[in-house]
Image (cartoon, helix red, strand yellow):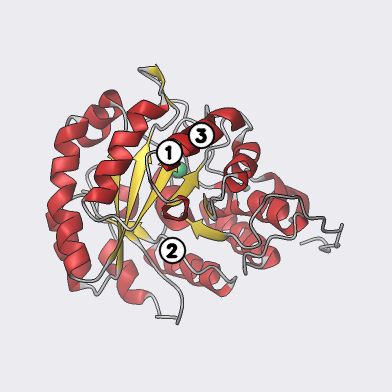
Amino acid sequence: MSELHNYGTTHLDGLPEQVRIWEVGPRDGLQNEKAILPVEVKAEFVERLAEAGNTVVETTSFVNPQWVPQLADAERLLKRLSTRPGVRYPVLVPNERGLARARSLGVQDIAVFASVTESFARRNLNRSVAESLEMFAPVVDAARADGMQVRGYLSMCFGDPWEGQVDPHQVVPVARRLLGMGCTELSLGDTIGVATPGRVTALLDALTADGIEIGRIAVHFHDTYGQALANTVAALRRGVTTVDASAGGLGGCPFAKSATGNLATEDLLWQLDGLGIDTGVDLRKVVEASVWLAGELGRPSPARTVQALAG
Ligand code: MG
């Protein structure tokens, strides 16, 4: 890795002092990679991301291995992880059976994955939006009764490859329903990466106008059209302090055509470090983890900051 110079830090008015990165590489990243990695490699990846200072590393998923064979080793992976004070390892749980599996492993944090659009709900969940929310309600309820934290993902918040533009009035009721059933936070997904900063601002304004606390909202941007960092700044200006990112820019979405490129954690860190926003995450260590993982995957990281620093 080339030397990491300090190119200076300058604050920008109206942004938070601290941002929590919600690292999704091991789950959202690896589930969309062609290669299936050995469980010990995944465990080391998760550990290295925690070691880099992340307080949240979304680890794996209990989705049917038929659909996501990359994460079929969820149980074995979770059993390998050491507990670290202050570090959370959320797991995606699709239904009550998944919750039972999570519970038996002592998982404290889960996430459910809802769609805002009917087309994606049909393709990804094989249900209507309303039916999928009905399926999640008892899962969220039981998890909360067990004292778990529950994140609700909302996919296709800005656009959908089958339906085109998605407007805030489609997102607000789904967000309200997920919070109403007990989700402790929401992550707004730009699953195909089509959002631009004005649209991000408009959606956040619509949610807060409906009485939803900004502190419960995270953003999940994809860099398909190169907008992820601009969208991030727009969200930070509206008070969002949790940003999803994937180490090395791993993954996209296997069910959504043209959904390439999770926002890379390193690109996000370059921006936040330069703005003087504290994340507690060490850029150098994340880059080193991504370079090592790229070797395991047999191809270079697509993240620009990794490419710039990895030489
Ligand atoms: Mg993603």
Which of the pair 300/275 is nearer the observer?
Answer: 275
Residue type at the position of mark 3? Thr
- Nearest-to-viewer mark from 1 and 3: 1
Residue 234 drawn at (x, y percent): 61, 40
Task: Pick whichever of labels 2 and 3 is earlier in the sequence.
Answer: 2
Real-space Cα separation, disc 2 to disc 3, in angstroms: 21 Å
On the image, which quarter does residue 9 sit in?
Answer: bottom right
From the image, tell me which residue sits under label 3. 260
Label 2 amino acid?
Lys
In front here: 29 or 223?
A: 223
Q: Residue at x 51, y 34 (%)?
A: 260
SS label for mark 2: helix
Q: Is residue 215 above or below residue 106?
A: above
Q: Secondary structure at mark 3?
A: loop
Q: Check disc 3: other Cα within 10 Å, few if <14, some if 14-19, many if 20+.
A: many
The mark that comes first in sequence, 1 or 3, is 1
At 60% from the left and 53% from the top, the residue drawn is 265
Looking at the image, is mark 2 or mark 1 nearer the viewer?
Answer: 1
Tell me, yes or no, if residue 15 can be seen here: yes
Q: Which residue does the numbered mark 1 point to in the structure image? A: 209
> Between marks 1 and 3, how big is the CA–CA gap?
31 Å
Residue under label 2:
42
* Label 2, ligand 1: CB separation under 8 Å: no
Nearer the viewer's eye, disc 2 or disc 3?
Answer: 3
